[in-house]
Image (cartoon, grey):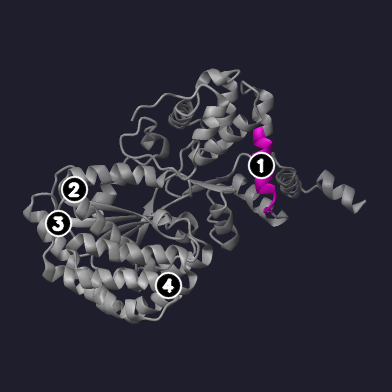
Amino acid sequence: MTYTVPTSTLEVLQKIEYEEALPAGDVRYVETQAARGSERIFTRLARKFGWDPTSHAFFAPPDKHVLFFGHIGSGKTTELRRYAQQLNASKRFYVVEVDVLAKLNRNNLQYTEALMAMAESLLDQLVTDGYDISEDNIRPLRDWFVPAVTTKTQSHELSAELKTGIEAGGGLPGLVKLFAGFTSAFKTGASTKTEWRQQIRNRFTTLATAFDRFIRATEAALKQAGRAERVLFLVDGTDKMRGEDTMRFFVEDAEQLLSIRTLAIYTAPLDLKYDGKLGGKLDADMVLPMIKLQERGGERCEAGWTALTQLLAKRASPSLFASPGNIASLVEHSGGHPRELLRLLKLCCEMADDHIDTAVVERAIAQLAADYRYFLKPEDYALLVSVDHDPEQPGNDAAAQKLLHRLALMQYNDGTWRRSHPVVRTLEGYRIAAQKLNATASGTQSPTTSALSG
């Protein structure tokens, strides 16, 4: 990738993409393992799927579905893509990336369309890589479509296209078109989506059996070619679903996900890990820690400061800043969250005439803080102040989960401590809550309380 660091605020502004995950080998990537304390995460993840990166021993389980937690925007996909590169290079795994945000509608996403997207992604990758699967193992998947396309829907043109695809056969390329037609309808057509979801649910066992057979045949072909022994799905974007959809996907419909006998990783929102509803159905102990700017005891974490300063320098030339202190201020107020740092940079570029000086940085921080003011309530500020006074408290009730999801509360290391977002600490609501807590601790009234009681 040919890349030059932008040297104008307008260029920086146009190149910031919040949803963009860096592919493996991207020159903008910054190593963050030491800053996160995540040096052992890849090894742990690989061992869950039966491969030891040190000894290269391999004893893969029949199936394994792993949730990969982390704050939204904390870099999960970027890290997973690097892990996928290493897993692929081992020649033990054939990693298939499934971007549900690109293929499907993130709002009201269900396991039915996620499964279709997984099948389409596998088929498409096999065609791209030049692999062929016997007709005997393709036919059960193709035959599954027959009742679906004969169902009366408002999308007659699409149904006719799918019917033609079934009749024509076409091997793997033809099967790709069939699944692509389904996922496209799931993304755009509300009435068609409802009918086809019901079709999948009604005949899910048949589909799961056919898909499992196809995966086994694919693994046999890959092994014969010396490419890999197991298919491993990397399902990304499932951490960005709405709350009720998250619960349905990972909790209520977990059995349907688990019925596919394969290896899979799903990105998942951090708050889901702490609501107590997952049980033991899915492997749910992998968390990508946040980048630390300080340790639990308050000491400065130099690795975190270095990583985020480098990340910023690869997105905007340091010459755009009036002083190094302006860069440090943006890093500090990001709380160690990569996307929050990019949000602050974006705001600076919108507000700056030419260079980014102290006044611009302060306005950007105030603007980002205002986004949090809109949804925070007095009881939220009280909880955040309480956590900051005792970072090791559990705080896993619904209020804490909401604040984790909205990033007002940030979690570090392996979840042993948390802190409020630095921009939230600049808000008046936070200062009032801190005064009240201090007054309670000292047995006196805060100035605000005294004024109200007078």
- Magenta-tinted stretch: 364-376
Is 162 above or below relative to 27? below
- Quarter of the figure with residue 114: bottom left
Q: Which of disc 1 and disc 4 is earlier in sequence? A: 4
Disc 2 designates what residue?
52
Q: What's under tag 2, amino acid-wise? A: Asp
Q: Name the front one of labels 4 and 3.
A: 4
Q: Residue at x 39, y 35 (%)?
A: 32
Tag of residue 59: 3
Q: What's under tag 3, amino acid-wise? A: Phe
C-alpha distance separating marks 2 and 1: 44 Å
The answer to whether the residue labelled 3 contacts the one labelled 1, judged by CB atoms less than 8 Å apart, is no
Q: What's under tag 4, amino acid-wise? A: Ser
Q: Which of disc 3 and disc 4 is earlier in sequence? A: 3
Tag of residue 369: 1
Q: Name the front one of labels 3 and 1.
A: 1
Q: What's under tag 1, amino acid-wise? A: Ala
SS type, badge 3: loop
Is 194 above or below relative to 109? below
Q: Which of disc 2 and disc 3 is earlier in sequence? A: 2
Tag of residue 155: 4
Quadrant assignment for the N terminus: top left
Specify whether 244 is left or right of 414: right
Residue 278 visible in the displayed image: no
Q: Residues within 10 Å of mark 3 (few under 14, many from 20)?
A: few
C-alpha distance separating marks 4 and 2: 49 Å
Specify whether 155 is left or right of 63: right
C-alpha distance separating marks 4 and 3: 46 Å
